[in-house]
Image (cartoon, rainbow, N blue to C red):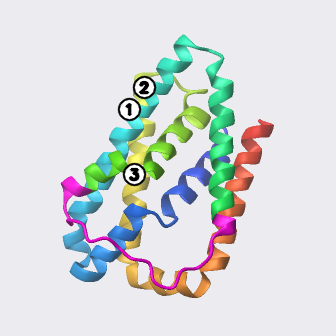
Amino acid sequence: MQWIPFLLYVLVTSFTPGPNNIMSMAYASKSGYRNTLRFILGVAVGTTVIALLSSFFNLLLFSFIPKVKMWMSIFGGLYMVYLAMKMLMHKPRANEDQHEKLNSFISGLILQFINPKVILYAITANSTFIIPYYHSTVSLILFSCFLGFIGYASTSSWAVFGAIFQSFLRKYERAFHLVMGLLLLYSAIIIFLG
């Protein structure tokens, strides 16, 4: 397994701004970390379920259609290039509207099933990094739990450091997106060369 590109992909994708992190930060800035914990746990459980479903779906595809492995790796690499380009082309926005949602476990859980970032994250991580090397049910469950834990860690850190991240991102937003985009490009290049 290509551990460095896998970890870079997982960390960059999880810790960059997205619906989970932004909502977690907004909830924590209004009602504190403790009251946001139920939303964060919903995100973690939802991410784990999406990762599990994705891993078994990908394993099923690989079992029945062995040639799909190459195409899934290409898709995963291209998706990482797409994410990198979005990061590199990102233009700072003065005031982003944040939709008010319920700060609850259920809303955190349900959000994962309509959040394209999480769905593509799980599909890409599984098809590109995990399924080509691991096939046992135990390993797929462990990797899915790991992806869910990273989801918990990212939304939790955004909640804890919400105010700090808000000011940091506003001040150094362009540099942050440049570094994250370059890390994603590196991961995609490793996939294409590997």
Disc 3 crowd rating (10 Å Cα; few below 14, some 14-19, many 20+) is some
Residue located beneath label 3 in the image: 115
Return the x and y of residue 12 as percentages of the image width and height: 57, 59
Determine contact: label 1, label 2, CB under 8 Å.
Answer: yes
Type of amino acid under label 3: Asn
Residue type, label 2: Phe
Whole-percent x and y of residue 86?
A: 63, 61
| Label 2 crowd bin: few (<14), some (14–19), many (20+), radius 10 Å | some
Q: CA distance from mark 1 to mark 2?
A: 5 Å
Q: Is residue 181 left or right of residue 105?
A: right
Q: Looking at the image, is 164 positioned above or below residue 40?
A: below
Looking at the image, is mark 1 or mark 3 nearer the viewer? 3
Where residue 51 sits, quadrant-wise, is top left
**Residue 148 visible in the snapshot:** yes
Query: What quarter of the picture does the N terminus occupy?
Result: top right
Please name the residue that numbered disc 1 is placed on.
53
Query: Going from the N terminus, do you reach mark 1 or mark 3 first?
Result: 1
The residue identified by callout 2 is: 56
Highlighted range, magenta: 87-107
What is the secondary structure assignment of the residue under circle 2? helix
